[in-house]
Amino acid sequence: MPELPEVETTRRGLEPLLSGQTIRSLEVRQPRLRWPVPPELPARLAGARVRRLSRRAKYLLLETDQSGALLHLGMSGSLRYCAADTPLRRHDHLILQLENGFQVRLHDPRRFGCCLALPPDGAPHPLLVGLGPEPLGPDFDGDWLFRRSRGRRGPVKAFIMDQAIVVGVGNIYATEALFLAGIRPGRAAGRVTRAEYRRLAEHIRAVLEAAIEQGGTTLRDFRREDGSHGYFAQTLRVYGRAGLPCPACGNPLRTRRIGQRASSYCPACQK
DNA sequence: CTTTAGGCCTGACGGC
DNA sequence: TGCCGTCAGGCCTAAA
């Protein structure tokens, strides 16, 4: 499932292929995504020239010389750049046809993704307002987490997955970073110390950077934009490994549900 | 303000 | 073999 590293990997792969290209059309084969694809979007994009493909949190922004589109890959979405005669697959919901003969297809079996119009006046899309800092940017660090966490009684894992606190930290990387920082996912966020938050912030950054470096984790549905697999999944230490030995101490990893999410952790290494 | 539950989806999986 | 219930998961929205 695309987390921030997968989205960034997709962006880096597609940006040079899309930048400067002119859009011929957008074909909407299945408008019913997380939100309906706006009926006016194809007309808005037709004839527009792509300025760049950027990212905010897990949103991809296809910026054109006349507004553009906002995409989210949800749980199972992927973008694929291919020739126009490439056979369509089931769940290819959107087809962005370029003037150069190539296409970008949004493939999303579970349809948790979305494709919406960016405001034409250059204003930020409502979905982007109120988001927390980028975890790889300059505004995110342990002191920020510490300050925002005071008084919060919910679990620290839910806290770092809150998009208003820091964006793009999904279940996989939250689980991994908490393990590396030695913090139990169920601890109340307000009781985690400043020193622990400094460690945690650094591990969040490191684990995301490592995953981007390696091309993104692959779980089940995710494909890189060229269709190949990422391979970071092999290096996950605790996520999805409940019952298996802790890679640090050998004790069996435990699992519990925190905020409706599966969370595995080592009862010995994480306090 | 924070926190929680519900809902959107399909495919994989286990049980019978 | 086939049917069916359960689960997974990002993240918005509504409600507590």
Image (cartoon, coloured by chain):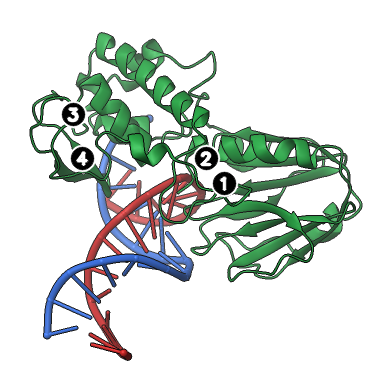
Chain colours: A green, B blue, C red
Q: Give the answer, above or below, for where A145 lies relative to A155.
A: above
Q: Are marks 4 and 1 in contact (CB under 8 Å)?
A: no
Q: Is residue A46 above or below residue A205?
A: below
Are the residues under marks 3 and 4 on the same chain? yes
Of pointers 1 and 3, the one earlier in the residue sequence: 3
Mark 2 and mark 4 on one chain: yes
Q: Residues within 10 Å of mark 4 (few under 14, many from 20)?
A: many
Q: Which residue is mark 3?
A: A184
Residue depicted at 8% across the width and 26% down the height? A268
The residue positioned 81% from the left and 60% from the top of the image is A42
Mark 3 or mark 4, which has the lower sequence index? 3
Query: Please, what is the three-letter code of the amino acid marked with disc 2?
Result: Glu
Amino acid type of the residue that numbered disc 4 sits on in the rendered structure: Ser
Q: Which mark is residue A183?
A: none
Q: Find disc 4 in the rendering and name its residue.
A: A264
- The chain identifier of the residue carrying mark 2 reads A
Q: Which of the 4 quarters of the picture holds residue A26?
A: bottom right
Judging depth in this view, the residue of A125 and A244 nearest the camera is A244
Q: Secondary structure at mark 3?
A: loop
| Cα gap from disc 2 to disc 3, whole angstroms | 26 Å
